[in-house]
Image: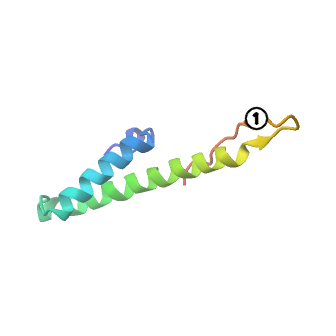
Amino acid sequence: MDSDKTSKLSFETALTKLEAIVDSMEQGDVPLADLLGKYEEGTKLLKICESRLKEAELKIEKLKKQKDGSAAFEGFEPARGE
């Protein structure tokens, strides 16, 4: 899997691909020769999912209550290379 394309995947896309890999591995559909490659791909996808969740968590933490009771969003730059 191309790491540049992989790093741009959405959480949903990465999770769907990861679930497909896990399903095929659990069902024994992956030949032993391809197993290591699938494991590596799954590890990359897992990191992407974790990164996207961390970004969402940071966005939620940036929400703060205004004096008038409304919510305001403060932008942030997510850390890269996680």
Q: In the figure, residue 33 lies in which quadrant?
A: bottom left
Farthest residue toward the front?
A: 69
Image quadrant occupied by the C terminus: bottom right
| Residue neighbourhood size for the residue with mark 1, other residues' Cα within 10 Å, grouped as few (<14), some (14–19), many (≥20) | few
Tell me which residue sits at (44%, 39%) in the image: 10
Count of labels in the image: 1
- Asked whether 65 or 32 is in front, the reply is 65
- Asked whether 22 or 44 is in front, the reply is 22
Q: In the figure, residue 44 lies in which quadrant?
A: bottom left
Tell me which residue sits at (13%, 65%) in the image: 32
> Residue 17 placed where, x, y %?
30, 47
Visual colour scheme: rainbow
Tell me which residue sits at (49%, 55%) in the image: 50
The kind of residue tagged 1 is: Ala
Query: In the displayed structure, does residue 25 sit left or right of residue 6?
Result: left
Tell me which residue sits at (25%, 54%) in the image: 21
Query: In the displayed structure, does residue 69 sit left or right of residue 1?
Result: right
Query: In the displayed structure, does residue 50 sit left or right of residue 41?
Result: right
Q: Is residue 43 above or below residue 66?
A: below
> Residue 71 placed where, x, y %?
75, 36
Q: In the figure, residue 26 lies in which quadrant?
A: bottom left
- Identify the secondary structure beneath mark 1: strand
Q: Which residue is mark 1?
A: 72
> Residue 81 placed where, x, y %?
55, 51
